[in-house]
Image: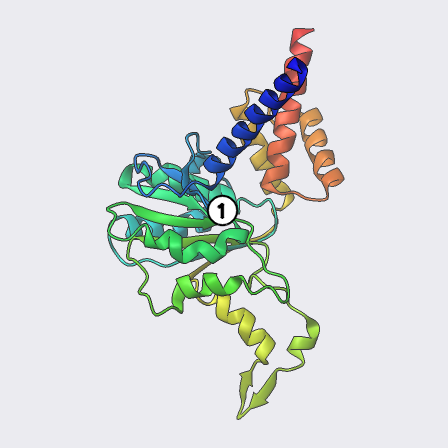
Amino acid sequence: MTENKHDASELLRRAESLIERLERLFEPASQSPDWNEIAFRWRRGRGLQPVHRPHLIPLDDLLCMELQKEEICRNTHQFVTGRSANNVLLWGSRGTGKSSLIKGILHQFQGDGLRLIEVEKQDLIDLSDVVEQLHDRPERFILFCDDLSFEAGDASYKSLKAVLDGSIAAPPENVLIYATSNRRHLLPEFQRENLETRVVGGEIHHGEGVEEKISLSERFGLWLSFHPFNQAQYLQIVEHWLDRLGASGTGDAETRKAALQWALRRGSRSGRVAWQFARDWAGRKQDESRT
């Protein structure tokens, strides 16, 4: 009998614990985020969640993208100073610094009232709710959509189109969208769609499929393209990160050869691969110095 009472008591305790956890999970989102934070994530059902330790990258650490840095810094400076500016699409090869550049922008302009809000693809349907919380705030907000792409038949991009330029609600002056993607038009492009293109009166008219894709990317006023690095650029980036990590640079024949072999095995000479090699090589050299 005593054992049954103990079991029932334990079951009740676990049930109360479960209910408490569920209540925390589904509690209404706070209407008053701590705007002293500089970075947030949007979580469905929980609203804006602060990122207490955001990944900030100094712009000086981003090499071989001077034109892209200049353009996005100019656009962001216009934005934080209250002037007109454009939504930005950063597109191109993987590992070439698109997301890192956004983190660099936050690092550069956080003192000017810039705030970054990351919204994942599955939460794009909530974009209008995110924007609604930002009206009349003195800060300037960038909604960051990373690695954005949509598959055929995916209708969630319509929420993004509406916020960019296509809703009856006027977009707030203190909000821009910066998105990164491996695809220029964010949607897959198929050869059969190009067959729909026709020439009328000497002018090219795309088919409906192509027009639908272009209509989304055209809502970004500024396009920044990123392309694979050549060997010299790759080695320059490796050299930079080895110096940051306190290791010998690529002037050493052994290091240069190892860096090129690393890129060959990975099939890419991207900035990401350069950073990964530098971390691996610097760690190895630290181990050797201890022995």
Query: Circle 1 is placed at which residue position?
Result: 65
Q: Secondary structure at mark 1?
A: loop
Q: In the orientation shown, which residue stands out farthest toward the front?
A: 1
Task: Determine which quarter of the picture holds residue 132.
Answer: bottom left
Q: Nearer the viewer, residue 49 or 8?
A: 8
- Give the side of residue 263 with respect to residue 132, left or right: right
What quarter of the picture does the C terminus occupy? Answer: top right
Task: Determine which quarter of the picture holds residue 14.
Answer: top right
Colour pattern of the rendering: rainbow
Q: Position of residue 195 (x, y in %)?
A: 67, 80
Q: Is residue 116 above or below residue 189?
A: above
The residue lying at 64 percent from left, 82 percent from top is: 196
- Give the side of residue 137 with respect to residue 29, left or right: left
> Tag count in the figure?
1
What quarter of the picture does the N terminus occupy? Answer: top right
Q: Is residue 130 above or below residue 245?
A: below
Q: In the orientation shown, which residue stands out farthest toward the top?
A: 291
Please say whether residue 242 is visible from this viewpoint.
Answer: no
Q: Position of residue 2 (x, y in %)?
A: 64, 13
The residue lying at 43 percent from left, 55 percent from top is: 127
Q: Position of residue 257 (x, y in %)?
A: 72, 31
The residue lying at 62 percent from left, 67 percent from top is: 153
Q: Nearer the viewer, residue 165 or 87?
A: 165
